[in-house]
Image (tube, helix red, strand yellow):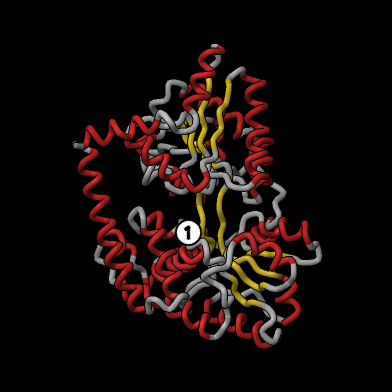
Amino acid sequence: MKHIFVLFLSLILLILPGCSSEESAADTGKKTLTIYSTMSTDSERNTFRKLASAFEKESGIRVSIHFPGNDYENMMRVRMAANDLPDLFDTHGWGKIRYGEYTADLRDMDWTQNLDPNLNSILKNKSGKVYAYPINQAKDGLAYNRNMLDRFGIDPPETMDDFIKALRTIKEKSNGEIVPFWFAGYDKSSFAQYYDQFATPLLITDPAHNEKKQLIDGTFNWSKFTYLSDILKQMQKEKLINIDAVTAKKSQLIELMAQNKIAFTMQGGTLGQDVAQINPNVKVGIIPTPAIHSDDDPIWIGGERYTLAAWKDSPHLKEAKQFIAFMARPAHAKEMAEATSLPSGLTNVKADIFYAKDYQHYQNMKVEPYFDRLYLPNGMWDVMGTVGQELAADILTPNEISKKLGREYKRLREQSETQGAENNE
């Protein structure tokens, strides 16, 4: 049965993007590197294409780039099942856990000497294998409207209590005209981001509330997660989040922030520079994720954002590493970091990015990996997004949400273990 399934997946691969371009490249006698990436904005993609074109001219090697968007993960699952991956691909936060067995070891490449130590636990294993080249690195926290905080005399919050107080002050002093904390809940990832980002200070970083072992071995008591749903529901009842949190779309965010109608949101990336293009008088900043427990400190949530991993069985592995080396040149790494408005993954690259002053100001704050990437089975991100929507729509209570998360956590762990056993047969 398993062999039939793999055969079916192999047939699907014939219609995936990239095959036709590889065949046409063979007609010209040139080698072609196929690259899959999760880059989403025009500025990111255009800069990547420009650099790939420069590589083609310099090396004589063709490059076929694909941006599957929301279909990326499904396409990569199909390719992994058939052991037929692109020559280069984006591990999008799963370099070790999901893609590790398929990636070539890059430890002997020159740029690894400048790998940011913050990424060591995410992109290296204990024996020294380097899984991917980090085009940039995420440092997620809370994006905020500096104008609003200055106007109402609010300091950037460092704890959850301070954050709630700030939201209440904004609502009161603006007479409800400004949304204190804005969610784009039509895309459930907005709620998933909330749960995932605040789960780390709730359950990991404070020694007195550390649940690492229980999360990893499957014994975690999900009632301890209820706090996050309680806080979110409390914010909704007090109208500290937008009343259309379930139906609001990401496409609305830039315009609303540019109109001074939003104080805080969880969207980072190019938000600040996008808002500045519409209204340069609105200043957007970013702060680390506030601490939840009294003895803890704020943290950045992050790690790898966009990467280039080389498929270990690629027939063009030498050329794939050649492309990575090209992208890792300081000038090129700087260009990509600036296009994505995120710090470079290399210590010898200083990019002029929009939030540079904020990152410099909070440079001593720890960077913690995304919660779901270390402690949850594959599929839990979607579950967290769905329950967030159900909470905001009054379909489930906070306690019911924790019970559902516990059931799905168990189901997905068992599913993952079963698939792992089948793959080893």
Residue occupying image coordinates x 67% and y 38% = 47
Q: Which residue is mark 1?
A: 368
For label 1, the SS is strand
| Total numbered labels placed on residues in the image | 1
The answer to which quarter of the image holds residue 13 is top left
The answer to which quarter of the image holds residue 244 is bottom right
Residue 283 locus on image (x, y percent): 75, 65
Q: Is residue 75 above or below residue 195?
A: above
Q: Nearer the viewer, residue 101 or 85?
A: 85
Residue occupying image coordinates x 37% and y 43% = 126
Q: Is residue 48 above or below residue 229?
A: above
Residue 415 locus on image (x, y percent): 25, 52
Residue 416 locus on image (x, y percent): 27, 50
Q: Is residue 57 above or below residue 346?
A: above
**Left or right of 280 in this view: 205:** left
**Left or right of 161 in this view: 228:** left
Residue 154 locus on image (x, y percent): 68, 80
Q: Nearer the viewer, residue 21 or 63?
A: 21
Residue occupying image coordinates x 44% and y 38% = 131
Q: Residue furthest right?
A: 281
**Residue 77 seen in render:** yes
**Residue 104 seen in render:** no
